[in-house]
Image: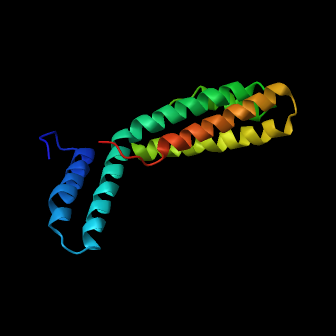
Amino acid sequence: MTSKSLSIDNALHGLDEFLRDKIAPAIADPYVAPMARLSGLLLRICANSVDDATELRVDENAAIREVLGQAAALVSEPLAAQLQGAAASADPGLKISVLDEENQRLRILLVTAQCELEKDTSAAAKARDRTIWRLLESIEAKRAPRERP
């Protein structure tokens, strides 16, 4: 383990290294040793998730707000006003729980907007619907667990 400041992600990476490099090689049991390595990998994935959590949510919320602002012009009132209000809003804080609540609020509006856009057969509405699907795909891809050093 390197000498970095103590943080959750550094602690989890340290536990991963310890399990992978010290514990797993010392275990003779053919079932337990791979489980120790797998546990280390899960710790590494969790560490990466912790490290990226705030940035990921802030970026997602900003991207959703942008799309909501664009969709507002294509839907009728009172939804248009709700979308414009959400587009002009800001994250109320940087705690993960607060960002997750805001993300949930924005996603509900996004789905509501998408439902309205899917009823509209205009080219602009169809294009905006495709934008929403690409956004959702991008969000899920960025949230997917990954391994990195």
Q: Left of 40 or right of it: where is 124?
A: right
Q: Which residue does the image show at 15% across and 39% down from the upper left?
A: 4
Q: Left of 80 or right of it: where is 13?
A: left
User: Which residue is more in the foreground, 95 or 70?
Assistant: 70
The x, y position of residue 131, in whole percent, is: 68, 31
Whether residue 94 appears in this view of the structure is: no
**Relative height, residue 112 to residue 26 (above, below):** above
Coloring applied to the structure:
rainbow
**Relative height, residue 111 to residue 124 (above, below):** below
Query: Where, by quadrant of the figure, is residue 63 drawn?
Result: top right
The C terminus is located in which quarter? top left
Q: What residue occupies the far left of the structure in this picture?
A: 3
User: Which residue is more in the foreground, 96 or 93?
Assistant: 96
**Relative height, residue 149 to residue 90 (above, below):** below
User: Which residue is more in the foreground, 37 or 71?
Assistant: 37
Q: Which residue does the image show at 22% across and 75% down from the upper left?
A: 29
Q: Which residue does the image show at 17% across and 55% down from the upper left?
A: 21
Q: Which residue does the image show at 25% across and 51% down from the upper left?
A: 12
The x, y position of residue 102, in whole percent, is: 53, 41
Whether residue 107 appears in this view of the structure is: yes
Count of marks overlaid on the render:
0
The x, y position of residue 128, in whole percent, is: 73, 30
The x, y position of residue 79, in whole percent, is: 75, 35
